Amino acid sequence: MKAITYISDPSHSYLKVPASVVENLGFMNKISEYSFFNGTSVWLECDCDAQLFFDALDERGIEEPLIKHQSLNFQAPFRLLPRFTHNAA
């Protein structure tokens, strides 16, 4: 698995994960409406949805990928995308 990105803006933080990885790990149906989705990536809200990713890795014995950090001084642009819904995937 490639590196993933932890993104924080002035009000919140998210973990950007490829949608294909989320689907393969099998937790897409558990993601809340506080996360965002654009067809290729899912920005997992860090208070609860990001933990779904780490739990799925642990359940399968998969090592955590390298996590790159990105801090923004403005609202993250992906927050203008529609919020995640189970129908989005």
Image: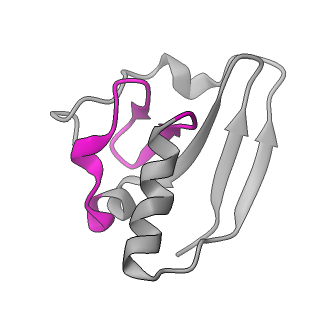
The percent coordinates of residue 80 (x first, y second) are: 50, 17
- The magenta stretch spans residue 54: no
29 and 1: which is toward the camera = 29
Q: Is residue 78 above or below residue 59?
A: above
Q: Is residue 56 above or below residue 72?
A: below
Tell me what residue is drawn at x 69 percent, y 39 percent: 7
- Provide the residue span drawn in magenta: 23-47
Left or right: 65 with respect to 69? left
Q: Which corner quadrant of the image does residue 84 belong to?
A: top left
For this orientation, the residue located farthest to the left is 87
Q: Which corner quadrant of the image does residue 15 belong to?
A: top right
Left or right: 8 with respect to 32? right
Q: Is residue 41 above or below residue 23?
A: above
Color theme of the render: one colour
Q: Is residue 59 above or below residue 40?
A: below
- The magenta stretch spans residue 40: yes
Tell me what residue is drawn at x 43 percent, y 43 percent: 42
The percent coordinates of residue 19 (x first, y second) are: 36, 53
Tell me what residue is drawn at x 33 percent, y 43 percent: 39
Counting every numbered tag in the picture gives 0
Q: Which corner quadrant of the image does residue 32 belong to?
A: top left
Query: What is the quadrant of the C terminus in the image?
Result: top left
Tell me what residue is drawn at x 69 percent, y 69 percent: 66
